[in-house]
Image (cartoon, rainbow, N blue to C red):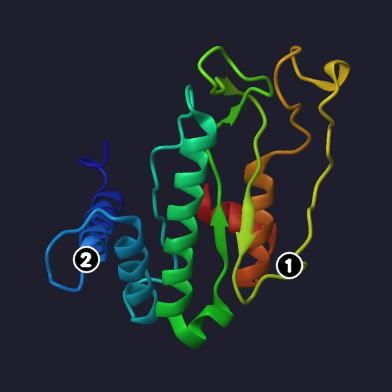
């Protein structure tokens, strides 16, 4: 996909290089653990290499045993974000963290004590530069039967990408139109 565009090809190569650097643990060996990845990301963000990063944490597909899986996943996420904050030190005060997912889950449990893919979801913002922290923002659609989307899902009330764009525009102190030009 990037082969014909020199600028995108270079950006892709730089992104892969930064990802590999972030995945290296203190021992210099590749480590796929989220906590180590978060620490590596913090080291990159404190240096001159990057002012924006993305981390991935898989394992959120909870078709069965949702309670156990979510408890484990939230523990891993908490540990990783704590490591990111600690490793960033005072740079945390200038940091915005966005935690988002690509899709939601159904409201009702399935037959294997899990939930299936759904429509609406949630996202979290954290960081020292965050305004309006400690609040739930947006509209709550409700969980009553007549409030569910297609009778099974939490109803979407806003677009996650608008929240991300607005948060980044505020964080980087650019207008939303400038940001949209940057990110396409």
Tell me the SS state at disc 1.
loop
Q: Quadrant of residue 170?
A: bottom right
Answer with left or right where residue 23 lies relative to residue 29. Answer: right
Residue ID at (73%, 67%): 133
Determine which residue is flagged by label 1.
Answer: 133
Q: Is residue 62 above or below residue 71?
A: above
Question: Residue 54: where, in percent of width, then height?
Answer: 41, 56
Q: Is residue 12 above or below residue 96?
A: above
* Secondary structure of residue under mark 2: helix
Distance, label 2 to label 1, CA atoms, is 31 Å
For the N terminus, the quadrant is top left
Circle 2 residue: 21
The residue drawn where x is 41% and y is 70% is 83
Looking at the image, residue 178 sits to the left or right of residue 61; the answer is right
154 and 179: which one is in front?
Answer: 154
Q: Residue at x 63, y 70 (%)?
A: 171
């Amino acid at each position: 996909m990037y082969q014909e565009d020199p600028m995108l090809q270079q950006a892709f190569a730089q992104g892969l290089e930064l990802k590999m650097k972030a995945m290296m643990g203190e021992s210099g060996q590749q480590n796929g653990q989220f906590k180590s990845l978060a620490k590596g990301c913090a080291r990159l963000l404190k240096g001159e290499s990057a002012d924006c990063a993305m981390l991935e944490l898989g394992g959120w597909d909870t078709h069965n045993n949702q309670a156990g899986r979510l408890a484990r996943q939230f523990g891993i996420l908490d540990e990783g974000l704590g490591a990111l904050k600690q490793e960033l030190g005072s740079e945390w005060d200038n940091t915005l963290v966005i935690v988002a997912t690509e899709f939601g889950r159904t409201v009702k449990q399935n037959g294997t004590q899990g939930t299936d893919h759904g429509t609406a979801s949630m996202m979290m913002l954290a960081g020292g530069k965050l305004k309006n922290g400690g609040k739930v923002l947006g509209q709550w659609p409700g969980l009553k039967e007549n409030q569910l989307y297609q009778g099974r899902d939490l109803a979407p009330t806003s677009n996650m990408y608008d929240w991300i764009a607005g948060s980044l525009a505020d964080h980087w102190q650019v207008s939303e139109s400038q940001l949209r030009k940057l990110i396409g």
